[in-house]
Image (cartoon, grey):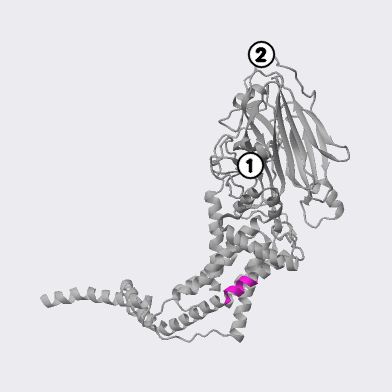
Amino acid sequence: MDKRLPLALLLSIVVLVGWNYLFGPKPSDRPQQPPSTTSSFDPSSATPSPTKQGPETASPAPVGETLQASAERTVELRIGTPGTRGSYFARFTNVGARLLDLRLGDSFDQPMLDAAAKADIAHWTHLLDSVGQNGWVSGSLGLRASGSATAFERGALDRALWTMEVLGTEQEPTGVEFAIQPGSGVLFKKRVSFIKDSYELKVELSITNQAAATSGAATFLFTPAEVVPSESGDSMYVEPQAVAAGRATGQAEAREKPELRSQPRDASGSTPGEAFALPLGPMSFGGVHNKYFAVLARADGPSIPTLRGATWRAIRDEAFAAAHPEEARDAWRFIATDILLQLEVPELGATKSWSYTVYAGPKDPVALAAAHPDYATLLEHDLGFFTSIAHFLLVVLNFFHGIFGNWGVAIILLTVSVRLVLLPLNRRSQTAMARYQTKMKRIQPQIEALKKRHEKDPAKLRQEQALIMQKEGAFPPLGGCLPMFLQIPVFFGLFSALRASYDLRQAPFAGWILDLAKPDQLVQIDFNTHLPFIGTIQYFNLLPILMVVLWVLQQRLMPKPTDEQALKMHRMMTIMPVFMGFFLYSYAAGLSLYMMTQSALGIIEQLLTKKFWPLDATELPKKTGGFFAKIAKLQEEQAKKLSQPSSTKKKRK
């Protein structure tokens, strides 16, 4: 069984890579046009569309008072105590009342930093960023009108100059408040405040009708996150991804899981404006996430019905395209989610307000559950098809980590536990296989004699060989591969858990292995060649090499089979470890550690079995009943029937 495990794991990797290739984001030949600098929003599309302006189209006269800033302005805020939950660095602009930069103060870009480095904002995890697009700088938390609501803008709200006031004190700021009266008779306000000791921001919107002649429902687009940087560069996890979740009608209870739709960014530049296929009914949340962090917006209480859907759009990084002209098609590096808000312009003299909460933090199960129960669907989405197995493995890993305080040790103990659980079944299958091989050695001379006798008649050879196999009951044991198949789901589950578990981010093991969620990166090398499946090699990773060595050693300890077909398989298996090392060279060190432990335990088991607990390879007598005996009897009867017509013909002649 063990000698087929590397093949099974290789096939598992091929399935994963193939699935990612077939069902992952595909290159597109769609035109790659960045958003224009002056725009309004077409409700049938999520892309800003040009507004026709010129000398012949005079702007209508302002209605009521106007209130706008006279110049562009940015403010930088440090929120909370660095190193604790709720600490951020934020940079706001009054252009569009948006957030240009957001960094998390209790999470860092590198492991094992000292206190001075942790105090440096440059090392804080980048949650939100901004990029240039044809002379325009992107930003998050933007609000713009759609459809008939554009009459209340008099120019796009996400590009106008709002007034901006810092909330709190100079020493302890808590947020900002924006306001604008574009001359349409209404006053727009947006207040962004950070909730203390949490990963959440409160976004409060209000509309005051000061002089507008019309009122009623108005559609707006709210963008919680426009540029979420990639966190890991993992080729097996496309990031960032736009996401939206909602419930079908009748699933209003909080305990019901919402349906989630996710759209990975497409580096080739997908056409913006495609809507998420959300079910009818209330929307739960929407935003953008990468491998370990998420920015998600939801409505509070009475504002929940205002969430009416979501669309996504690609964001092009013009600076990247200019710096890498040969990779210009890869400049569509980001994706944004636009949430459709159904607000209401109140009657003359009245004000309407709405409240939304934006989660901006790690995809940590505890933190997400504390923020909102529905966020658990995002974690389940990351774990994929093997969610239940991955959840169970994470529970076991957390148990061992709670005892030993080291995730690498937890992975090793998990592997040992799986091996021990499967030991009785493994031993039984190995014994059955050994007895089968003993029987094959005994009948091998008969098979060789048949090959010489029917050398020129392959059909007769196969028939006679099948009769011998049936007569001797020389059939491979049905349960021989069962332990291997039981380990494959464990492999897939651990693959999913290591791919997306925030607990393993920057989790050290020993020596140079400082992050089990990334390759071990023993030595940095200057080899910037892009290879298929591996990507660009910048580090020498030792663990995949050791993993291949252990596989080869385990393979050599296996006895060579006598059956010709099995011998061909054995020879093919000698090159499989090399392919496995190639596929897994740039994957998480934790997965390499798991498979190294698996191979090491297999080697130890073989050595101890030979010395202290040898397999009973004694050939058992042929079973008189059973499935294969019935098949043999049926084949014998069929052979007799086929021979009867020929004998009858001879008598007639």
Marks 2/1: CA–CA distance: 38 Å
Viewer-nearest residue: 183 or 527: 183
Residue type at numbered disc 2: Ala
Classified by dominant secondary structure, the portion drawn in magenta counts as: helix
Q: Which mark is residue 286?
A: 1
Residue type at numbered disc 1: Gly
Left or right of 579: which side holds 350? right
Q: Is residue 419 magenta?
A: yes
Residue at 62% across / 25% down in the picture? 216
Res. 222 in view? yes
Mark 2 vs mark 1: give the one in front. Answer: 1
Q: SS for tag 2?
A: loop
Residue at 66% across / 63% down in the picture? 395
Viewer-nearest residue: 181 or 251: 251
Viewer-nearest residue: 361 or 601: 361
Res. 549 in view? no
User: Which residues lie in the magenta part?
Assistant: 416-423
N-term-proximal mark, 2 vs 1:
2
The picture places residue 404, in percent across and down from the top left corner, at 75, 68
| Residue 620 lies in quadrant | bottom left
Image quarter of the C terminus: bottom left
Q: Which residue is mark 2?
A: 58
Q: SS for tag 1?
A: strand
The picture places residue 415, in percent across and down from the top left corner, at 64, 69
